[in-house]
Image: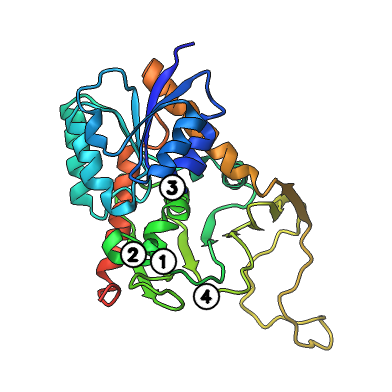
Amino acid sequence: MKQLNVVILGQGRSGRDIHGLHLKKDTERFKVIGVVEPMEVRRVRAAEEYGCETFTSYTQLYGRTDIDLVINSTPSHLHYPVTKDLLEHGFNVLCEKPCVPTVEQFDELCEIAKKNGRVFLVFQQSRFAHYFEKVKEVIASGVLGRLVQVGIQFNGYARRWDWQCCREFNGGNLANTGPHPLDQALNIMDMYDGMPEVFCRMDRCNTFGDAEDYCKLILTAPNKPLIDLEISSADGYPLFTYKLHGTRGSLKGSMAHIDWKYFIPEENEDQHLIKDPLTADKVECFPAYCTEKLNWHEESWEGDPQAPFIAAVQTYYDQIYALLTEGREHDIKLCQVRQQLAVIEEAHRQNPHIGK
């Protein structure tokens, strides 16, 4: 089995605790041969943990021909310039989310990658989380009927005071947390050849920076379910991660537990429209209301609340390996990331007060 040489830029929560954690286990397919990190103590630790070279700047990689993939897990506002430089110098790049603030910058990166024959990927691993795969499985089964609304909440109650709550660093709930549920929402909507209508309301509640920590995003399109996406840091009573409304059933659930119920029309009384006043009987004609007892089928799924993150990263890297060794296309396509960025850019356009 071919072993791919990898360099990680950054040893923060993403570079070390997500990518690094996985790569230290996936050593048959990947080898971390370098880490770029400005903090000396982190460089020393990386050298011990990976047994690799360390660098203070990614420019020290220029001219190397033994690197199969560079992981750009630098702070968010550096994703565009660093990825651009790396692609121009002939490296394959996996960029952390949020990729870039604008569609214009994203298109430029895609063009540079194409021009130089390089692979450009964006780390949207939540598409492969077990709980989301179960939601997609239930939808695909058809038991819920036609989807009318998809509610998604990535909520909690928290104050934030780090760099990721600042607009100058491309922070805020929508850019920081939002790529996960928004990628899932757009995948359910499945209209990558166009753009949904976007309504967004942002607010600043308990953040110490100037970026939003509350975001309500409504997406609509003809013949598609309404998407109601909420990313709030002011919700002390989060009720669910997903809630689906369908013409034959409903689904609700979290990352650890999902319930869904549905009825089968053939098992229930065949109703028809009655325009005359409804009555309880034919003699006294007491008033009545539309009532019936549907024969519900109920199912559930149990999952490990930590497993979705581990499994999603595993699947993402499975596909990276297949792409770089076999040329097999990755499921997270650049056109899909572009649509997500267009939604985020429009959401910020509608909320000019954020960051002011």
For marks 3 and 1 on the same chain, the one whose residue lies earlier in the sequence: 3
Q: Secondary structure at mark 3?
A: loop
Closer mark to the observer between disc 3 and disc 1: 3
Q: Tag on residue 198?
A: 2
Q: Position of residue 36 (x, y in %)?
A: 34, 37
The mark that comes first in sequence, 4 or 2, is 2
Q: Earlier in the sequence, mark 4 or mark 3?
A: 3
**Residue at image point 48% right, 66% down:** 230
Residue drawn 17% across and 26% down?
Answer: 116
Please rate how many residues cluster around mark 2, counting C-alpha atoms within 10 Å: few if below 14, some from 14 to 19, many from 20.
Answer: some
Mark 1: secondary structure: strand
Residue sitting at 61 percent across and 47 percent down?
Answer: 131
Q: Earlier in the sequence, mark 2 or mark 1?
A: 2
Depth-wise, is mark 4 or mark 3 nearer the camera? Answer: 3
Label 4 to label 3, Cα distance in Å?
A: 26 Å
Disc 3 target residue: 12
Work out whether 145 lies above or below 94: below
* Residue 38, above or below 63: below
Instruction: Identify the residue under disc 1.
Output: 218
Residue 235 sits above or below residue 11 on the image? below
Q: Which mark is residue 234?
A: 4
Q: Nearer the viewer, residue 309 or 267?
A: 309
* Residues tagged 3 and 1 counted as in contact (Cβ below 8 A): no
Say what amino acid the circle numbered 1 marks: Ile
Q: Is residue 219 visible?
A: no
What SS does tag 4 mark? loop
| Separation of residues labelled 3 and 1 (CA atoms) | 32 Å
